[in-house]
């Protein structure tokens, strides 16, 4: 449930984040264009022209990935589905939805708009290629041909029927339509995604061992990523499905430890953090302040004689009637292991990541064995 990376902006109301691994890909793609593709396929380009064309092609590549993900998010938004953010990372990008599609048709369209966007971009850069040839302008030819090929490859790869790729989500929508069971469709699509990942890893190993091809390493990395992404996506989606009819009141713990706001930091550390072996402690409300929590790891060393209430964080407080899916999203965004639950400003409970995980795992096991409750 942890986030990594940093926010770079907002497009049409949708947050755009860059995972730290994206920086690696940025330089890899830039080097590939500038020192690999362009000098090999277009040797007449000067070194300066290659560098400039390489930078432009790299930026257009990431713009293409962003447009691919934006198409998913904008369609989801038009259907009333909540979007957490778009994240670009080393293997491309992901539109992170809070809500699941409401019907197989919605799922299929949501998944399909991404590859269609990439195909459209491939055609657009194909026009740029033709224009470059018409003008006999090599840099335009280089950029057009490279981006047309890359977007076509992106569309084809995403159409593979392995969840959570777009093709895997289309496959899930089809299974959902046939069976009428979203959970079963998700399990089936995830299994196919893992099988596809293993096949990519195997093919990559064959290329490396028998042919000594460097590209095999990239296939191995993609295979490992796809396998892990399939497992992680399955866990996230099943969590939302199993929590969709639950509220915070159903899952919160009513027995909790909370410190008074007036307690000094030195006493707080000894009586709560050391005693209970937990750096995150709830803080009670007083006449002027709402309840909150304190992360002892964030306390300044010079604050030992300061009341703990000065450092209480109350930016992500839950209420008993909040949906459990909303609570899960709040925990994810806060990067905390627990959040306070309040009613009329007073603490009434605490909701923890472990409590949600325990409920989800237990309910999933019961359903898997057919013992529905």
Image (cartoon, rainbow, N blue to C red):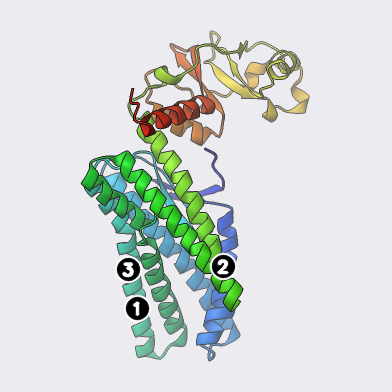
Pick whichever, 221 or 102, lies toward us: 221
Residue 301, how many percent across, how many down?
77, 27
Q: Earlier in the sequence, mark 1 or mark 2?
A: 1
Give the residue displayed 43% in from the left and 82% down from the top.
Answer: 140
Q: Is residue 309 left or right of residue 173?
A: right
Tag of residue 59 = none
At numbered mark 3, what does the secondary structure look like: helix, strand or loop?
Answer: helix
Q: Which residue is mark 1?
A: 126
Q: CA distance from mark 1 to mark 2?
A: 34 Å
At numbered mark 2, what does the secondary structure look like: helix, strand or loop?
Answer: helix
Image height of 206 relative to 41, above or below: above
Tag of residue 119 = 3
Q: Which residue is mark 2?
A: 205
Pick whichever, 61 or 47, lies toward us: 61
Residue 160 picture quarter: bottom left
> Which residue is outermost to the front?
369
> Which residue is outermost to the top?
287
Please identify, in this view, whether the residue under mark 1 or under mark 2 is nearer the observer: 2
Residue 292, how many percent across, how many down?
55, 19
Q: CA distance from mark 3 to mark 2?
A: 30 Å
Q: Quadrant of the C terminus?
A: top left
């Amino acid at each position: 449930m942890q986030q990594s990376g940093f926010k770079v902006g907002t497009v049409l109301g949708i947050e755009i984040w860059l995972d730290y691994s994206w920086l690696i890909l940025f330089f890899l793609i830039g080097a590939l264009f500038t020192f690999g593709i362009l000098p090999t396929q277009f040797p007449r380009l000067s070194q300066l022209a290659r560098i400039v064309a390489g930078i432009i092609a790299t930026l257009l590549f990431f713009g293409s990935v962003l447009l691919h993900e934006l198409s998913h998010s904008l369609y989801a938004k038009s259907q009333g589905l909540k979007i957490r953010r778009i994240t670009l990372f080393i293997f491309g990008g992901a539109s992170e939805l809070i809500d699941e599609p409401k019907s197989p048709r919605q799922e299929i369209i949501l998944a399909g708009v991404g590859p269609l966007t990439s195909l459209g971009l491939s055609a657009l850069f194909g026009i740029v290629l033709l224009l470059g040839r018409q003008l006999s302008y090599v840099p335009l030819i280089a950029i057009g041909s490279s981006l047309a090929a890359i977007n076509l490859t992106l569309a084809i790869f995403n159409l593979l029927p392995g969840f959570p790729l777009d093709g895997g989500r289309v496959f899930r929508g089809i299974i959902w339509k046939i069976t009428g069971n979203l959970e079963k469709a998700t399990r089936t699509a995830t299994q196919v995604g893992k099988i596809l990942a293993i096949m990519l890893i195997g093919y990559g190993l064959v290329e490396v061992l028998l042919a000594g091809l460097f590209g095999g390493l990239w296939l191995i990395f993609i295979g490992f990523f796809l396998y892990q992404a399939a497992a992680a996506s399955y866990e996230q989606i099943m969590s939302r499905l199993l929590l969709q009819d639950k509220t915070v009141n159903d899952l919160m713990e009513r027995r909790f430890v909370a410190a008074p706001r007036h307690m000094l930091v030195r006493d707080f550390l000894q009586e709560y953090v050391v005693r209970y072996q937990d750096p995150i402690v709830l803080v009670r409300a007083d006449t002027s302040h709402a309840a909150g929590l304190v992360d002892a790891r964030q306390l300044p060393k010079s604050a030992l004689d300061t009341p703990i209430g000065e450092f209480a964080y109350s930016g992500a407080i839950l209420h008993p009637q909040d949906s459990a899916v909303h609570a899960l999203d709040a925990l994810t965004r806060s990067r905390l292991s627990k959040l306070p639950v309040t009613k009329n400003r007073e603490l009434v409970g605490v909701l923890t990541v472990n409590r949600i995980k325990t409920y989800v795992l237990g309910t999933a096991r019961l359903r898997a064995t057919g013992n529905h409750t």
